[in-house]
Amino acid sequence: MEPLNRIKLGILVLLTIILTATLGLMYLEGWDFFTALYVTVITLSTVGYGDITPTTFWGKLFNSFILSVVLGRWPIPSPPLQGS
């Protein structure tokens, strides 16, 4: 696979995860789109301001699952991008 295609695939996977997490938090927590997107981006960037957090059991479990998926998946595309 060419480097440009790997970059495109990595971006597509990341956007899919962000959209899935946003829609999941909208459903589980009853948040509007922008609040759910904000929490998703803050969570996935591991900043975690703490101003808005999931309050339900299922919302917390879902958020933890999404974070573990991203932290477990993200390093995989990095070596091809570095030219290794």
Image (cartoon, rainbow, N blue to C red):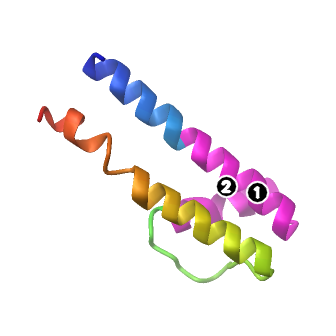
Task: Indicate the amino acid at tag 2.
Answer: Ala
Instruction: Identify the residue at image location x=50%, y=64%.
Output: 68
Q: Is residue 43 left or right of residue 2?
A: right
Q: Position of residue 33 (x, y in %)?
A: 78, 54
Q: Which residue is mark 1?
A: 24
The answer to whether residue 31 is visible is no
Magenta segment, which residues? 15-43
Place residue 65 in its image quadrant: bottom right
Q: As drawn, which residue projects farthest toward the top?
A: 2
Callout 1 touching callout 2 (CB < 8 Å): yes
Q: Residues within 10 Å of mark 2 (few under 14, many from 20)?
A: many
Q: In the image, is residue 74 part of the stretch drawn in magenta? A: no
Above or below, comparing residue 55 to residue 84 in the picture: below
Q: Regarding mark 1 in the picture, which secondary structure is present there? A: helix
Q: Position of residue 54 (x, y in %)?
A: 72, 77
Task: Indicate the amino acid at tag 1.
Answer: Gly
Q: Is residue 59 left or right of residue 47?
A: right
Instruction: Identify the residue at image location x=45%, y=73%.
Output: 47
- The quadrant the C terminus occupies is top left
Q: Position of residue 16 (x, y in %)?
A: 60, 40
Q: Which mark is residue 67?
A: none
How many numbered circles does the render carry?
2
Q: Which residue is mark 2?
A: 21
